[in-house]
Image (tube, rainbow, N blue to C red):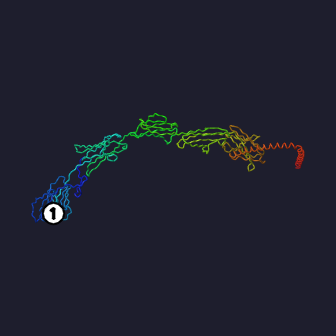
Amino acid sequence: MGRVLTPWAEDPGQSRRHVGKSWQPPCLLRGAKRAPEAGPKPPSSELVGLRSLGLYTVNAIYGDTITMPCRLEVPDGLMFGKWKYEMPNGSPVFIAFRSSTKKNVQYDDVPDYKNRLSLSENYTLSIRNARISDEKRFVCMLCFYPIYVLEQPSQPEILHQADFLETEKLKMLGECIARDSYPEGNITWYKNGRVLQPVEEVVVINLQKTVDKSTGLFTMTSSLQYMPTKEDANAKFTCSVTYLGPSGQKTIQSDPVVFDVHYPTEKVTIRVLSQSSTIKEGDNVTLECSGNGNPPPQEFLFYIPGETEGIRSSDTYVMADVRRNATGEYKCSLIDKSMMDATTITVHYLDLQLTPSGEVTKQIGEALPVSCTISSSRNATVLWIKDNTRMQTSPSFSSLQYQDAGNYICETTLQEVEGLKKRKTLKLIVEGKPQIKMTKKTNTNKMSKTIVCHVEGFPKPAVQWTVTGSGSIINKTEETKYVNGKFSSKIVIAPEENVTLTCTAENQLERTVTSLNVSAISIPEYDEPEDRTDDNSEKVNDQAKLIVGIVVGLLLVALVAGVVYWLYAKKSKTASKHVDKDLGNIEENKKLEENNHKSET
């Protein structure tokens, strides 16, 4: 759409500018000079002609009104008219101004002409009350301006865009079109904000300009042929149109356009996709092969260890539930085998063998060798646990005791491999026939005695107390806690006469019976100490073995001494008879004295 533009202000005091340069509107000048009163009066129509200035003389009577017509033809596009006079030194003094559009008149603040001036529509200047000082040269200026028609073009567009670009190939990228410009504009191409300069066989730019005959407006079309590189991927291409505006040259940018750049694969890469950094038996492993070309390759050849022929697949190859024999070097290549890459996979494993395992039943005192064997791809740690408590050493049983029974766990772990842990269990049961030891003790009150039946055995024996002879069963008993195959059953009695108590312990293996003579409460007797703890019982057992050894040794010594004594006694038999006779008389006398004493009593 055409527009008439006037790139200056109405105020004549302001400077006039057009398209960025200093500009003054062209003016027509006509000079008028008041003639001296005493001199000759030339005809009023006399003109002094100059090439750039028309000069004529005006005569006036002192005190009358001086009338000075502009005598210039008013041109089309008149902007304003002005009158001025010249000082003796040649400097101008403006006195009147009239705008052709606003029709208003402005008189400059000149004291000599205050309230004396009048400027008509045809730019005739009248000066009232003529004075001698009015004799000077006056100049009429009619200033006009040319008309320029400018039209801003539309925003440029990049049309007919290529679907993609290819390296090493010169290809039409697109056309930049800017429409309806006057005067014609110029188009520039940019890549990432930098101007693209023509380069043979790399950057080829062609500009065409057409004119619409009906409007006279220009349309500029610039085509760009471009040979990209890999680095042009994601590059932003734009174009701009530069045109003439009211205040000078202006530029409008297009929207950026990004092109997909195709380039061949230069490198193949294989990598392992796994949920963790290490692979263990049972994991699912995915191999991914990729090429750095664009578009990337869609098919590859995968090579597994020990195989020379590749397996054709997409960009991934999946191995499910891998085993340790999957450890090795894996490769992938393009279909044409022009490029290849390799990676090594290590499948970690952990084997544990516990001997024996499961539920094992052994008899007390038996030996039980236990072994936990580990086979792994890395050094593994071994941990033994008994009844949820960590053991400091591996179990070893040369002579099983009841306290050895329990649940054993052998656990091994590969610290380097997340989630690789194995464990096996051994449930050890130690059985034994009932063993009984009875003890008695007089209580501190001297009014009762405590009889304890110490029982060992597994399964836990059932205990029964009876009184020998009468066969009566004692039901009022107290039992300690059954720990490590041991417990105690206790009764408290106050016998009026000597009594024999029987403790019977019975489990699935055997029935054991033990008796103990207990004196009446009035008769003092030796009290046997009770076993305090299981550890004390073990110590007593060890001490008993030592005592048995000492006793056997003493018996041997006594036997030897007896033989020696028998030999000695045989030699002195005669002397012994005489002594025995005397001793017999002494004994008889002693018995008689005792009988006599009883009779007296």
**What amino acid type is highlighted by mark number 1?**
Lys
In this picture, is 341 found above or below 195?
above
Residue 214: image quadrant is top left
Query: Which residue in the protein does label 1 denote?
Result: 136
When asked about the image quadrant of residue 269, the answer is top left
Give residue 216's position: percent from left, percent from top. Answer: 22, 45
Residue farthest along the top direction in this orientation: 309
Place of residue 387 in the rendered image (x, y in percent of width and height, measured from the top left): 61, 43
The percent coordinates of residue 509 (x first, y second) are 69, 37
Q: Quick one: 365 or 61, which is closer to the camera?
A: 365
Left or right: 409 as drawn, with respect to 240: right
Q: 505 or 393, which is in the foreground?
A: 393
Which of the 4 image quarters holds residue 219? Answer: top left
Up/down of 133 relative to 205, above or below: below
Q: Residue at x 24, y 49 (%)?
A: 150
Q: Is residue 8 left or right of residue 283?
A: left
User: Is 17 or 486 nearer to us in this picture?
Assistant: 17
Q: How many marks?
A: 1
- Residue 440, how many percent across, how many down? 74, 46
- Looking at this view, is 439 or 51 the one in front? 51
Secondary element at image label 1: loop
